[in-house]
Amino acid sequence: MKLCRCEVRHESRNGVKCERGGEEGANSTVACAEVVCEEGCRNTHDGPARYCRAGYEPRAGWCRDSDECVTEDTCEQRCRNTIGSFQCSCVEGYELRADRTSCKAINGDPLFPTP
């Protein structure tokens, strides 16, 4: 969980009431009560807005792990979805290249063509 601050508003997007204080004009920078934001949080004129970090996607009001392996070009050979990320690996006779997504033959020519 991450704490974020909301600009002067009576209520943030998640329904938490902000503390009133100072002039509440458009240019006011008086901070309101801290609001707990799950996942990432950024301040907007309407209060804190939650967003999903890389590796997550919004679903039913929450941020859930994305399955990066469903995309065909994530890994050249094998893909294992992990929480918030993914891990590529290669079949026997190949090793993972420095880019961590493509594979190269360990001894000479490829056993089968790869894209």
Image: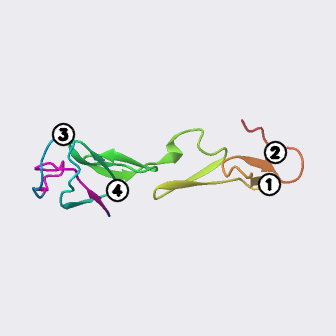
Query: Mark 1 or mark 3, which is nearer the start of the sequence?
Result: 3
Q: Amino acid at mark 2?
A: Leu
Q: Amino acid at mark 1?
A: Gly
Q: Amino acid at mark 4?
A: Glu
Residue 11 lies within the magenta run: yes
Residue at screen point 13% across, 56% down: 18
Residue at screen point 88% across, 44% down: 109
Magenta part, dominant SS: loop
Query: Mark 2 or mark 3, which is nearer the start of the sequence?
Result: 3
Please give the label number shown on residue 93: 1
Q: What residue span does the magenta drawing correspond to?
A: 3-18
Q: For the residue carrying disc 1, how many other residues have a C-alpha within 10 Å: few (<14), some (14-19), or many (20+)?
A: few
Query: Mark 2 or mark 4, which is nearer the start of the sequence?
Result: 4
Please give the label number shown on residue 39: 4
Q: Amino acid at mark 3?
A: Ala
Query: Mark 3 or mark 4, which is nearer the start of the sequence?
Result: 3
Q: Secondary structure at mark 4?
A: loop
